[in-house]
Amino acid sequence: MQCFRRQPKRSVSQENILREQSRRVAALNGIRLGLKDDKDLKFLLKGSQLLKVKSGSWRKERFYKLQEDCKTIWQESKKMLRSPESQIFSIEDIRDVRSGHKTEGMEKYAKDVPEYRCFSIIFKDQRKNLDLIASSEDDANHWIAGLGKIIAHSNSMNQKQKLQHWIHTCLRKADKNKDNKMSLKELKNFLKEVNIEVDDYHAKRIFQHCDKSKTEALEDDEIEEFYKILTERKEIDKIFQKYSDAEGFMSCQNLVRFLYEMQQEEDAVVAAPALIQRYEPNERAKRGNAMTKDGFLMYLLSDDGNIFNSSHRKVYQDMTQPLSHYLVSSSHNTYLMEDQITGPSSTEAYIRALTKGCRCVELDCWDGPNSEPIIYHGYTLTSKILFSDVIKAIKNYAFKTSPYPVIISLENHCSVDQQKVMAQHMTTILQDMLLVAPIDGNKSQFPSPEQLKGKILVKGKKLSRQEDPTGTNGNNNLEAEDVSDEDEAAEMEDESVKTEIQQKGKSDTLKLAKELSDTVVYCKSVHFNGFEDPNHPRAFYEMSSFTESKALKLAQESGTGFIHHNIRHLSRIYPAGWRTDSSNYNPIDLWNVGCQIVALNFQTAGTEMDVYQGRFQDNGFSGYVLKPEFLRDEQTKFNPKSITEGTWGTKKKLLLKIISGQQLPKVNKSKNSIVDPKVTVEIHGVQQDNNKKQTKVIENNGFNPKWDEEFTFDIEIPALALVRFVVEDFDMSTKNDFIGQYTLPFTSLKQGYRHIHLLTKNGDPYSSSTLFVYIDIQDCD
């Protein structure tokens, strides 16, 4: 039985003092966020009763309140023995706040409540949505606007402001008796809170240095002094001193020298004055066109000091080439939130994929009740969702992240009547978004992503005797005919699925309705019968789907042939049938032979998804990345499995120094658990380039570990290489725990002193967890 220590009862005056202190802290944090005296923020800090909606029969009143840190929400719980931590969620964990009935839960369970009282909190990870009903329209508006402002202002804070906010929150948390002072014991607890283990002697030495008043407690300026010692970056001070004068200023001329010599910035003369104006907080320095140490640190922590080339954050590649010349961010069985056998299906999975830049989504369509087609993983116990609801979600979210075309990949198992309903839903819901005729009468090759902006394409079967997509001869009066059935679910290596298929007596053909066939223009699904005969070329719009094993076999045995096929045709790859746990395969080998639609399970985190998101953060996160010239050239002889001399780009040598880490998150939330971090650097590319090297382990320091270790990598084909940085908590007895990672294309690396802003397991950014590195790229002799 768990025992609870009774807290000593406070007097009314003590309670009032604490309440006033809390109000002041909240006001200060509001100012830090740029929300001084904001009425929505004040409402959230006061809190309100909201109805939490879980199902048609579960709708209960709970109290919700923004904490004084302006970073976390406290939610009332009626569960016995629930830990205080489980009643709090962070604003940083929120992906979106939606008003009205904009989630499946609200659609199903809150239709009786006016939309203006409803809103939903969507989380970044796999957590379920939080559907809420306010008592009035005003209350709902306060919550929606208030949360929106906090998220927007938090995102716009620079790294130094985020660090200051976080440390002051941890200081407040460590101040157990809320007297705004810090005893030695509270200081040691604080250090554990920020993920650093300090022996008693070192902790006491820091404490005595800061305790100028000799009162055995730090307060006001003494706490600020402690903050300065804690956040000192000696490795950056050393760099700054080399380029600054005796008074601690780096002149514009010296900043130009630093940018040119160390950062390899070609436009250093133009960039330097702009960086001073953008990042220098000292007005005197700014007026003198110089930079202080604080401004220099802010620059290095900013987007301009990032390891990822900031010019690649917008679309910079040629988007006017044929669609088949691009890698396309693509999802497999997009409707699934978890595994392939019993997991839930949800429209939310489509929204998440599309907002992560996915441009090709999959719909497995089956006959549903009331003549309404449904989507689920056939022959399994995965839950079912309406086809029409999915099409609505695609319409609403297709172009929020990227304006470039979305491909709907249909796996159709419906009767002719329900196929007609599918076609009707797509044409009535998507309207002008749905591509139903060739662009500019293009009959010989794919249109470009630029020409297809804002359009949704359908990939599926096409009636063979019907007029073809590009408008040449055919029988246009055909109503329906048998076509081959592509049934990926039937390939699953699961006994229950195999039994279900045997009982149902699966057919190899399917009758296809003309109405559904008419929605297919540029992506006609055909069975793969080998690479085309040059004397009898296949139509460019015919495309095939390959299981990963079949595609990898073709890449291994006929790499150059596969590359030539993928110059003119689209290829879609999907996971093997044995991956019932929704695990992923490595997409690299298939990108290396020019396969465009390499579909992964977006719901499954791991190395494969990290590499995937790393590849597609390039070119403005548009979901389309132009293949290198040697994968688009019809005369190419490139073969990734047997690299010979050719025009594949200059070989490079990557010199890399892992210097330090900052504010690494705790893996184990226990107060006494401190991480032992190590960094692994991986190269993913052609076989010759695949490599990994790792640092030593730093014991008991996740706050500011220092490695100062150098590595060298030879890169044979830079255009196909990606670099992944992984930070783990070393454990001698069990598998290392993942802390964070960051993956980017080799061609997007910036040189010089750079910060790497780490991502969570699900690919979301940590607020202030970074690595500090030095990068030097040289041409190989």
Image: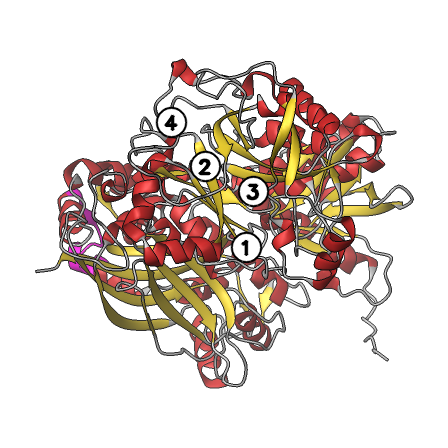
Nearer to me, 775 or 191: 775
* Label 3 or label 1, whichever comes before in sequence order: 3
Rendering quarter of residue 595: top left
Residue identified by numbered label 1: 762
Counting residues from the N terminus, which is met first, the one under dot 2 or under dot 4? 4
**According to the image, label 3 marks what residue?**
353
Q: Report if the CB atoms under discs 2 and 4 are less than 8 Å apart.
A: no
**Helix, strand or loop at mark 1:** loop
Say what secondary structure mark 2 lies in: strand
Q: Give the foreground label among 2 and 1.
A: 2
- Give the quarter of the figure containing the N terminus: bottom right
Residue 303 showing in the rendered view: yes
Residue 382, percent from left and from top: 73, 51
Whichever of callouts 2 and 1 sits on the residue coming sooner in the sequence is 2
- Range of residues picked out in magenta: 240-252
Numbered badge on residue 543: 2
The type of residue carrying mark 2 is Met
**Residue type highlighted by circle 4:** Phe
